[in-house]
Image (cartoon, rainbow, N blue to C red):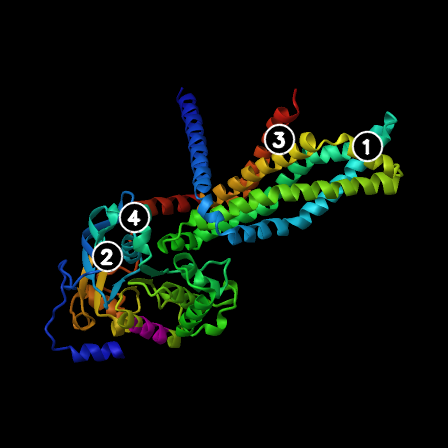
Amino acid sequence: MNIFARSIASLGSQVRTAIMGLGAFTRLLFALLGRSGTALSRFGLVSQQIHFIGNHSLLIISVSGLFVGFVLGLQGYYTLSRYGSEQALGLLVALSLTRELGPVVTALLFAGRAGTSLTAEIGLMKAGEQIAAMEVMAVDPLRRVLVPRFWGGVIAMPILATVFSMVGVIGGWVVGVVMIGVDPGIFWSQMQDGVDVFNDVLNGVIKSVVFGIAVTMIALYCGWTSRPTPEGVARATTRTVVISSLVVLGLDFVLTALMFGN
Amino acid sequence: MRRLNLRVHHAYAELKVMTANTSPAAQNPLVEFHDVTLGYGDVTVLRNITAQLGPGQVVALMGGSGSGKTTLLRAATGQITAQKGLIRVFGHDMSQLQGEELRAIRQRMGVLFQQGALFTDLNVFENVAFPLREHTRVSEEQVLERVLETLDAVGLRTAAHLAVSEISGGMARRVALARAIVLEPELILYDEPFAGLDPISLGITARLIRDMTNRLHCASILITHDVQESFAIADYVYMVGQGRMIAHGTPEQLSASNDPYVRQFLDGAPDGPIAFRYPDSPRFDEWLARRKGRS
């Protein structure tokens, strides 16, 4: 009975902690949105972050996109050739990338590359009294540190997802057309006919914006709430990757159901 | 040597060290602590502190490690509120200030943090320029001129282009000092300004603090362990320890003091009222018993 009561108490405590965390997360999001007006007036700070988050992630995103495109080209060709539909390879590659793989894989890579970097940076700023120094210098650290990073992440993510999809299509073309010998005209014309700008491309962009908001916010929140110790920062960066990955995959299901379901 | 001279010089002076909670009368005090109790959560660090500081004064706040000196600084900057008593800064009750009002007060202060707290994503120049960019609308030319001038005062004009990771600990503290004074604030709080400095930098920094206070007619609070340098520039010294104000007076008065706490601190004696060894506790005994039981 005692063990049962303790288990219930432990479960209750965990649920309460989770709800409180969600509340704090939401409050932080609204605090950042509320401060965005004045912070965005100094767009130089945001563009610095777009450069830091975006440019530094470009290589890993491009290389990953290329390999995903290679694999899609190969797997797509083997599957489609069973049904004599190899000519639809371009369409398969493009739809897979714009609708799903582009936004999702980019978000997962973004969480691992830029998200952890954001969390560690904020956590170390706390540990080094930089956040406290800013407060004492009458500078709002949310406005000065978090808001530019938030918008930097939100703006960089769809751009990176677009780059990923473009490079992925090139990867699919290299394998399908150059290596296997699918007709290039059919490859591109099938893609042109079958991909809808609004239903496919725009929905993919909307997904990547939502993932950008989610991953960047999770990274900032984990850094902001991390314990100001080396161990605390290490735990926070791990938490960023784990939570971001799960949230991205969960959100992808919800968004896919909303966008492409009947 | 200077401390010894001071002591000899004042050997026959009347002992005026005040061990009660009285403080020097400063006209138009910028910072006032009235019977203040400070702490974190349920833990009380300092009790019944009364002190004040006026324009043009350098006040040194001294005490052993963990005696609560930094806690006093945090209270003066509004980072923590008093558990009891009244803290006034620029005539405002700090417990009543929030948001923009608190920020307005903080804009009139400069703080040198114990660890420097330089922004690691900015270089030396941008760190010192930070308060100017955030709180003023001066042109880039003026920013350049003002920042280089301030860096020159701490001897680091030609280090302006370096990243924070490229400078030594002592240089970082001088950059942090430059950042604290670049706006020429009315109140400057220095948390261990002499820590990690070589003897040359230490002397120059001490003189800079004194000159700055005289020139701007600002108030300076110095949290330090360094008796010699701080006694050379301070107008008044407060000593905290054992959770309370132990003694206060001018450097001359404290140098002539026979108070055992003051004497032990100034002479650096191992024996006295300040315990060097951490006190024994039941938790330690339990831990030790467990360790021994395991081996």
- Magenta span of residues: B202-211
Of residues B255 and A162, which is closer to you in this image?
A162
Residue bearing the label numbered 4: B281
Residue matched to label 2: B90
Name the residue that disc number 1 marks: A190
Marks 3, 4 in one chain: no
- Which chain hosts label 4? B
Residue in view at x 35 percent, y 72 percent: B205
Name the chief secondary structure element in magenta.
helix
Q: Amino acid at mark 4?
A: Ser
Indicate whether residue B190 is drawn in magenta. no
If the image is split into quadrants, where does the C terminus of chain A sit? top right
Label 1: how many Cα within 10 Å (few below 14, some 14–19, many 20+): some
Residue marked by disc 3: A252
Pinpoint residue A212: horizontal percent, then vertical percent: 58, 40
Q: Is residue B70 above or below residue A113?
A: below
**Label 2 SS:** loop
